[in-house]
Image (tube, helix red, strand yellow):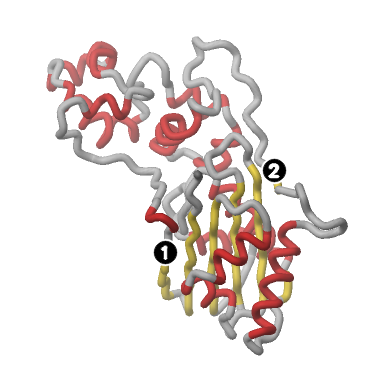
Amino acid sequence: MKKRLFFSAKRQLAMLSLLILVSASVLFSAQFSMQAQAAGAADAYAAIFDAAFYAAKYPDLKAVYGTDETALLTHFLTKGMAEGRQGNADFDVHYYMSAYPDLKAVFGNQLTLYYTHYMSAGKAEGRLGHAAAAAPQPAATVTASNTAVSTGDSYTDQVISLVNQERAKAGLSPLSKDTALSAAAQARSREMVYKQSHTRPDGSSCFTIFAEYGIGYHWAGENVAAGQKNPAEVVNAWMNSPGHRANILNGNFGRIGVGCVQDSNSYYKYYWVQMFTD
């Protein structure tokens, strides 16, 4: 059974306070361990690293580390990926970055994230890691989910409706759907496919997206979730989590935007984001 996860975040007057809740204590991170101490540690990175290949390809490293697998792997994790070095014959980060524009749009020039994506998702999705392989097939399209919805309603509108029902029960005024917030939330939900966190794939806070969409605010919040298949399920999950419930029932908020994408080739399939401002 797939585990589902959801997070909430709040921001007040530029002071960031994150409240992160994870169902079943599962966290996904786009970071590797920076130390390779255990024997056989290279096995965990077999999709992107082979010590013999690494030493042979980079004489400067072989001159320093010889054939010491632990030392070579440690260099790869702490420096090599950031430098764009090739860790094995199957994965070339520069090819991967140029072959898949959808990833480039999310990761930019953060080279380490491409290694992470290939190892954790890309290889399983059938993405090709190097130019010597057959011509790559088009990457799976990440599109807004619109399956199994009521006629005339989108998933995102249903989420807003359910949120306002919960606010009415608590004696709060309804939130207004905001066009700019909706666009920001949709962009964040696309980022969630690759990194389920309030930290964006480039390492910045989730709230940095507001500047990209011209959104001003004094109060702001974000709820995110992954794995819930429909609006009722995701709103129920949020309402049963204190941090997310607090965002939904925050009397300082007056506007909302909701994003949802479905990626059938990814682990969680559905990715949800709510963004709130005053």
Q: Residues within 10 Å of mark 2 (few under 14, many from 20)?
A: few
Label ID, residue 194: none
Quarter of the image for residue 118 reads top left
Secondary structure of residue under mark 2:
strand
* Mark-to-mark CA distance, 1 and 2: 26 Å
On the image, the x and y values in percent for residue 276 come to 60, 71
Outermost residue on the bottom side: it is 171
Disc tally is 2
Q: Amino acid at mark 1?
A: Ile
For residue 202, above or below residue 61: below
Residue situated in front as seen by the camera: 70 or 229: 229
For residue 23, above or below residue 123: below
Q: Which residue is mark 1?
A: 20
Secondary structure of residue under mark 1:
loop
For residue 273, above or below residue 36: below
- Mark sitting earlier along the chain (1/2): 1
Quarter of the image for residue 38 reads top left
Label ID, residue 143: 2
On the image, the x and y values in percent for residue 201 come to 47, 47
User: In screen coordinates, is 123 left or right of 235?
Assistant: left
